[in-house]
Image (spheres, grey):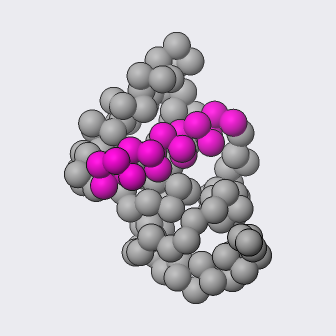
Amino acid sequence: MYDANKAISMTEEAMKMDPEGNLYELPEWSEKIAEKLAADEGISLTEEHWEVIRLLRRHYSVHGRDLSGPRLLRALEEPFGMRGGIKHLYELFPGGPINQGSRIAGLPPPPYSQDPSFGSVA
């Protein structure tokens, strides 16, 4: 039986992060861990946040890290087009739907997503 508290204590040890806050390795992940990571970044997860997180995790499970940041952002933009597109995604994840979203989803960011100007809607 899955014990979320045990998973969190085991995972906290494995949650070593790089200077940008991305996980070095993919530890056991849970929604409880995502909630903690999001809270650490000042985000209270809504169903729309979860939709982005699930899309990111699904893409990673299918493609690994071979998707580029811009390509992944376009993939996210499609289901959110009628809700404000990229601008809305940045409202959900002010630190970037790819970088911050990937951190909360427990995933490494895809290639070409570390440029600070990437995907800016300002």
Position in image of residue 95 (x %, y %): 50, 48
Which residue is at 38% across, 51% downward?
A: 60
Q: Nearer the viewer, residue 51 or 93?
A: 51
The span shown in magenta is: 47-64
Q: Is 31 placed above or below 80 here?
A: below
**Magenta: predominant secondary structure element?**
helix
Q: Nearer the viewer, residue 108 or 116?
A: 108
Residue 51 belongs to magenta span: yes
User: Image check: 114 left or right of 21?
Assistant: left
Which residue is at 71% across, 62% downward?
A: 32
Position in image of residue 8 (x %, y %): 68, 75
Q: Nearer the viewer, residue 115 or 89?
A: 89
Position in image of residue 70 (x %, y %): 28, 38
Q: Is 103 placed above or below 5 here?
A: above
Q: Nearer the viewer, residue 79 or 43?
A: 79
Which residue is at 44% across, 60% downward?
A: 107
| Quadrant in which the N terminus is drawn | bottom right
Q: Is 43 placed above or below 103 here?
A: above
- Please tell me how many numbered marks the rendered image carries: 0
